Amino acid sequence: MDIQTVEKTLSVKEAIESRHSIRKFEQEDISKENLTEIFELVRLTPSAWNLQPWRFYVVTDHQLKEKLQDAAYGQKQVTSAPAVVLVYSDMEDVIANLPEVVHPGLSPERQQEEVANLSSFFAGMSIEERGQWGLTQTNIALGFLLTAIQGLGYASVPMLGFDHEKVKEILSLPEHVKFAAMVPFGRQAAEGYEHHRFPLEKIVTFH
């Protein structure tokens, strides 16, 4: 069954308040239109210097999901979900294409200056350090992704419990990429646990 349209769009407040991690999903395909809508929102995520180091590998093929489930130590939500997205950073791709991130509204001279400054900054880092830097930005996109999925009527579960090297091999991803999460998502077929979160006074300081 192909869900062609989103039935109800939640407000940001509703999406955040209603989101729970779900591990059992309805066996309904997600249309290309709805997948595109989710990522049209996610691509608006902000990043330092607008570098946008996040990349998304969306898997809907069942055989490929079975391989991912094996790499995720048999966790059943991977094949239960109609779609699984691997969220990762690829800073080496960013560095190789720096002119793409510079705002076109800048003068040509200013654009060249920006590229030179960024090249110099990241040249002082190792590939590992650049990867970790990009991962901090990609985690912002992960938050946007979870909110967009929920806001458009789907449910999700972010996972880090998987063999990262094995997933890179399965998806033919470069060795240098860093994973933020594996995210199975779809229409929920089970209820999640009630929220259990720290009170504000533990996590927020007002002064």
Image (tube, rainbow, N blue to C red):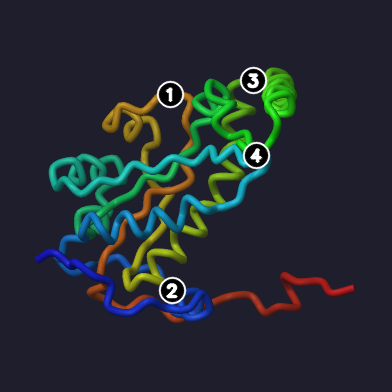
The quarter of the image holding the N terminus is: bottom left
Q: Nearer the viewer, mark 3 or mark 4?
A: 4
Separation of residues labelled 1 and 2 (CA atoms): 33 Å
Q: Would you say the residues marked 1 and 2 are in contact, meaning their CB atoms lie under 8 Å apart? A: no
Separation of residues labelled 4 and 1 (CA atoms): 35 Å
Earlier along the polypeptide chain: callout 4 or callout 2?
Answer: 2
On screen, residue 40 above or below 121: below
At label 2, the amino acid type is Arg
Q: Position of residue 138 (x, y in %)?
A: 54, 45
Could you classify mark 1 by the number of other residues whose Cα lies within 10 Å: few (under 14), some (14-19), or many (20 or more)? few
Q: Nearer the viewer, residue 16 or 161?
A: 16
Q: Residue at x 23, y 70 (%)?
A: 5
At label 3, the amino acid type is Ser
At label 4, the amino acid type is Gly
Res. 175 mark: 1
Q: Check disc 2 and report the residue beneath it.
A: 19
Q: Check disc 3 and report the residue beneath it.
A: 126
Q: Check disc 4 and report the residue beneath it.
A: 105
At label 1, the amino acid type is Glu
The quarter of the image holding the C terminus is: bottom right
Earlier along the polypeptide chain: callout 3 or callout 2?
Answer: 2
Q: Nearer the viewer, mark 4 or mark 2?
A: 4
Helix or strand or loop: what does disc 3 sit on?
loop
On screen, residue 155 above or below 51: below
Separation of residues labelled 4 and 2 (CA atoms): 38 Å
Q: Position of residue 52 (x, y in %)?
A: 55, 41
Q: Position of residue 186 (x, y in %)?
A: 27, 64
Earlier along the polypeptide chain: callout 4 or callout 1?
Answer: 4
On screen, residue 38 above or below 111: below
Horizontal side, residue 134 vs residue 111: left or right:
left
